Image: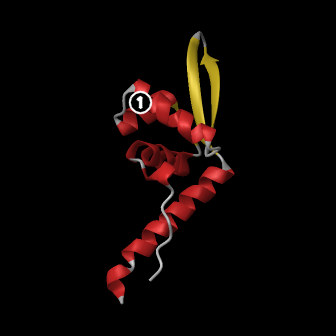
């Protein structure tokens, strides 16, 4: 059996959680992602920057009234990377099925 390589960027727990949320919702505001993942604001910011630098998500900074609002949206590249990651995981799960 040949295993597909796992995307190391997505294999990190918090980045995988962010991508999983965005796969389900297309986009989400920073406080929602923070609440759902239980991450600190600082750590979440770093991981979002990494996903953004890879082109997996787009980050839009705007305002809601006078308050800053950060919105994360998954890109088509991010969707494809996530789907490939899931397929790679499945290749590892097939081990005992022969």
Front-most of 63 and 77? Answer: 77
Quarter containing the N terminus: bottom left
In the displayed image of the protein, which residue is found farthest to the bottom? 98
Rendering coords of residue 42 (x, y %): 42, 25
Rendering coords of residue 50 (x, y %): 54, 38
Dot 1 corresponds to which residue? 43
Front-most of 36 and 98? Answer: 98
Front-most of 71 and 85? Answer: 85
Q: Name the residue at 48% across, 31% down.
A: 46
As drawn, 23 above or below 39: below
Rendering coords of residue 15 (x, y %): 46, 44
Q: Indicate the quadrant where residue 43 lies.
A: top left
Can residue 93 be seen at all in this image of the molecule? yes
Is 30 left or right of 34, judged from the image as shown? right
Q: How many marks?
A: 1
Q: Name the residue at 39% across, 38% down.
A: 36
Q: Determine the secondary structure under disc 1.
A: helix
In the displayed image of the protein, which residue is found farthest to the right? 76
State how the image is colored.
secondary structure
Q: Name the residue at 66% across, 52% down.
A: 77
In the displayed image of the protein, which residue is found farthest to the top? 66
As drawn, 91 above or below 55: below
Quarter containing the C terminus: bottom left
Is 11 left or right of 27, judged from the image as shown? left
Q: Name the residue at 45% across, 74% down.
A: 91
Can residue 28 be seen at all in this image of the molecule? no
Front-most of 6 and 89? Answer: 6
Is 63 left or right of 96, judged from the image as shown? right
Rendering coords of residue 86 (x, y %): 49, 64
């Amino acid at each position: 059996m040949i295993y597909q390589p796992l995307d190391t960027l997505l294999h990190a727990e918090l980045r995988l959680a962010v991508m999983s949320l965005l796969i389900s919702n297309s986009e989400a505001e920073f406080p929602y992602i923070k609440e759902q993942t239980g991450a600190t604001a600082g750590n979440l910011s770093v991981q979002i920057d990494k996903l953004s630098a890879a082109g997996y998500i787009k980050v839009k900074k705007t305002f809601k009234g006078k308050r800053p609002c950060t919105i994360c949206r998954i890109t088509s590249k991010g969707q494809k990377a996530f789907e490939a990651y899931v397929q790679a995981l499945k290749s590892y799960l097939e081990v005992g099925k022969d």
